[in-house]
Amino acid sequence: MSSNDPLATAAALKATFGPRFAWGSATSAAQIEGAAATDGKGESIWDRFCSEPGRINDGSNISVACDHYHRFRDDVALMRWLGLSAYRFSIAWPRVQPLGRGAWNEAGFAFYDQLIDALLEAGIAPHATLYHWDLPQALQDEFEGWESREIVARFADYAAEVARRFGDRLGSISTLNEPWCSATLGYELAQFAPGKANRAAAMQVSHHLLLAHGMAIQSMRAQGRPAALGVVLNHTPAFPATASEADRRAARLDDGLNVRWYMDPVFRGQYPADVLEHLGADAPRVEPGDLAQIAQPLDFLGVNFYTRSFISTAQPAVPAPGKQGFTDMGWEIYPKALTQHLVRITREYSPPPIYITENGMANVDRLEDAGRVADPERVAYLRDHLTALARAIELGVDVRGYFYWSLLDNFEWNSGYTKRFGLFRVDYETQARTAKDSAHWYRAFIGAAKA
Ligand code: IFM
């Protein structure tokens, strides 16, 4: 598919996606809401992390971000203009329970209540994520956060309360967003909050996250609400750079740590043996019965796909070919991996229906003149990934929806505001939103795909 015409792309793919396919976009609370201490919100580990010198590349913080907390109605109007049928957002745990246990913050719940109503009024199905990385700082102070098993019960309580209050109006509730990032980037590589560098701690954290997921699915299911329940995993399929034994083994291990470490316990009730062997003394402590708690039946699997890993053991490493280019994050653009990976996980795990809960690119967009933002690279990325997704469906993968990351330019974690993923450009001085060319493209595509 090479035409840049959204109508031609939609005409070619429409029958594959079908009339009930969910066309969406995604955001997360810490990245867009701002209002960091408004209406009783508690401090999160990302509020704290931003205040520590040297953590965020541009020295910025999330106290205002996109000011979505005050502008959510305008942002819902942008979604309506796009023609979205679904929107994925996250609930900030410290906004609704400032200390991560004990009292609920009614003003915090009121915000999400109004957001959900505004979405429903606009004909957009709301899809919530419970944990997109903004742990209440109080739980970090009290228990070392996810390092402690204590947190599992706290999370299950929080999940049950959200399901009880909102589970009749939400299309879905995801427990975790990308637990690999929380564990590895937060506790092993010190790039994300809370900024630790200890592999054994990171692996213990990954186990507690998975256990919290399983317990939360059970506590939410007990509320008997109709929202579909699932989890969102980030998958970066690993490709060996050459056919050498060393590259193939390294790629298999990379896949083990990123994909199988999370898929195997969730869908098979076990950790992968080769990864356990590789971890040795850094493997997590797992109590009897934990894996059965983790492997709960799910209504859907969320897959976040951006790129592939190109694994080379040579010195210097063989670079990724990048025939279709690299994004502003330095991530290789390789849509074919989306098709291959979805086919593979379907074959190996027989998962429940899949949603692509994130896919998108950071780009250096060009502000041409007032009202126009040229981002042909993003248009091509979107077109090529939708084409790759359609191919996976044709090959038998059950995919029910696609959420572009992200609706708005926003706070890109330790990159601060330097990376722009949005369909809408955000001027952080004025908070003005401008539809990029990609937003116009997606709007026309959705319109034609839904017609
Ligand atoms: O911005 C993040 C998001 O919070 C989680 N998935 C990847 C995105 C881009 O890095």
Image (cartoon, grey):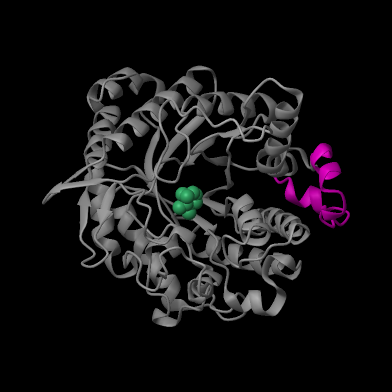
Q: Is residue 348 left or right of residue 120?
A: right
Which image quadrant for residue 193?
bottom right
Q: Residue at x 54, y 24 (%)?
A: 397
Q: Residue at x 34, y 68 (%)?
A: 69
Which image quadrant for residue 345?
top right
Q: Is residue 88 visible?
A: yes
**Where does residue 344 sit, x and y in percent of width and height?**
63, 25
Q: Is residue 202 left or right of residue 237?
A: right
Q: Residue at x 32, y 53 (%)?
A: 408
In this view, 96 is above or below 381: below
Q: Is residue 297 visible?
A: no
Q: Nearer the viewer, residue 199 or 384?
A: 199
Number of on-image labels: 0
Q: Is residue 35 left or right of residue 168?
A: left
Q: Main secondary structure of the magenta part?
A: helix
Q: Magenta segment: does it hold 274?
A: yes
**Where does residue 42 sit, x and y in percent of width and height?**
50, 79
From which residue to which does the magenta span run? 272-296
**Where does residue 202 sit, x and y in percent of width and height?**
72, 58
Which image quadrant for residue 215?
bottom right
Q: Nearer the viewer, residue 13 or 384?
A: 384
Looking at the rendered image, the quarter that the C terminus falls into is: top left
Q: Nearer the viewer, residue 228 or 70?
A: 70
Residue closest to the far left: 370
**Where does residue 105 sit, x and y in percent of width and height?**
49, 78
Q: Is residue 431 left or right of residue 287?
A: left
Looking at the rendered image, the quarter that the N terminus falls into is: top left
Q: Magenta segment: does it hold 392?
A: no
